């Protein structure tokens, strides 16, 4: 199997697990009183524990080969996660995920500007097709430029910038080390707020909070590994599949039937991914 095929499979798996994160966030009861900071700590704490155990088991070092770049990735990723979680609390699941999935577009832009990666015409067609599909799924006719939309867009920008740094980090740090420090950064950033204003989880909130952490760490490890096998321009488009997964969760879990526009958009997203993979 070629490196590009491995990257595609890894990113598809990452899209699946990362689509479970917003689902788990939405499943935390609104009347539970659990603040956003506590959800973020739950997301990061599980990842810290899991990656630390795996790093020690493999005998890897925790010391980064490029500390400042790893810090930048952690800061950008944390900002992307904060704005993403805040948007999820205000927008429907599918809308938030689709707007956030504009991040691959920013990966292409940042990879071109900062990493000098080339973008072929066929890839531009693939990305535009997927981007148009995202727009249909998001149903822009019914969406206004609100604070929630701005937060979702901001999460896409920060996520795109964070994913771009992974291409540069591949020469210095392993995927586990990157996820460990990124997760620890987010825990340290939001633990004080959680301690001062958090709520002790009950039976109805423990499972969703654990789901946020477990799905998040699996998705992060798979995604980080995917970016090590191929350029951002060739990997990012598969992240759009999380839009399809979010539509599935919205139907199966929340019993909300998507419109024909949403279905057409999902098909366009998958078509864009196929064009990129087939012709790249």
Image: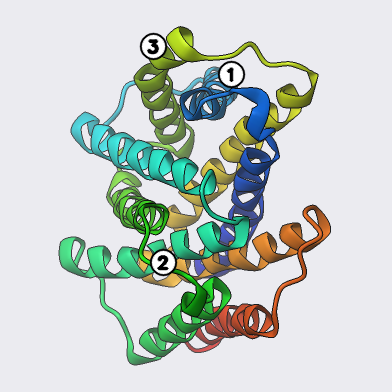
Q: Residue at x 41, y 55 (%)?
A: 152
Residue annotated with mark 3: 192
Q: Is residue 95 above or below residue 138?
A: above
Give the farthest residue toward the top.
196
Image coordinates for residue 107, horizontal then vertical, percent: 33, 63
* Residue mark closest to the camera, 2 vs 3: 3
Residue denoted by label 2: 102
Q: Nearer the viewer, residue 158 or 47?
A: 158
| Relative depth, front residue between 223 and 174 | 223
Q: Give the position of the N terminus as an image quadrant.
A: bottom right
In the rendered structure, which disc, 3 or 1, sits on the residue that comes first in sequence? Answer: 1
Residue 221 at x, y percent in the picture: 54, 41
Residue shown at 76%/63% (left/top)? 256
Q: In the displayed structure, would residue 118 be above or below residue 217?
A: below
- Secondary structure beneath label 2: loop
Q: CB under 8 Å between callouts 1 and 2? A: no
x and y percentages locating residue 134 in the rendered image? 51, 75
Q: Is residue 96 left or right of residue 262?
A: left
Foreground: disc 1 or disc 2: 2
Kindly state the secondary structure of the residue where label 3 is placed: helix
How much space separates mark 3 and mark 1, taking CA atoms?
Answer: 24 Å
Of residues 70 and 43, the one drawn nearer to the viewer in this rendering: 43
């Amino acid at each position: 199997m070629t490196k590009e095929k491995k990257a595609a499979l890894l990113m598809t798996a990452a899209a699946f697990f990362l689509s479970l994160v917003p689902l788990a966030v939405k499943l935390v009861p609104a009347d539970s009183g659990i603040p956003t900071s506590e959800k973020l700590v739950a997301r990061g704490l599980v990842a810290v524990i899991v990656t630390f155990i795996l790093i020690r088991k493999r005998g890897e070092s925790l010391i980064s080969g490029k500390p400042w770049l790893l810090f930048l990735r952690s800061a950008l990723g944390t900002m992307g996660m904060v704005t993403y979680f805040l948007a999820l609390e205000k927008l429907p699941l599918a809308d938030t995920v689709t707007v956030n999935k504009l991040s691959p577009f920013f990966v292409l832009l940042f990879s071109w500007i900062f990493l000098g990666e080339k973008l072929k015409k066929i890839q531009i067609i693939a990305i535009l097709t997927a981007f148009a599909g995202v727009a249909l799924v998001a149903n822009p006719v019914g969406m206004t430029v609100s604070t929630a939309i701005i937060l979702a867009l901001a999460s896409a920008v920060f996520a795109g910038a964070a994913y771009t740094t992974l291409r540069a980090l591949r020469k210095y740090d392993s995927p586990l080390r990157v996820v460990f420090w990124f997760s620890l950064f987010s825990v340290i950033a939001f633990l004080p707020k959680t301690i001062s204003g958090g709520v002790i989880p009950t039976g109805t909130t423990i499972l969703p909070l654990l789901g946020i952490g477990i799905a998040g760490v699996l998705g992060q490890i798979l995604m980080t590994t995917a970016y090590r096998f191929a350029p951002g321009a060739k990997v990012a488009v598969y992240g759009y599949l999380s839009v399809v997964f979010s539509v599935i969760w919205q139907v199966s879990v929340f019993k909300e039937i998507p419109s024909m526009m949403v279905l057409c958009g999902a098909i366009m997203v998958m078509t864009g991914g196929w064009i990129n993979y087939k012709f790249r």
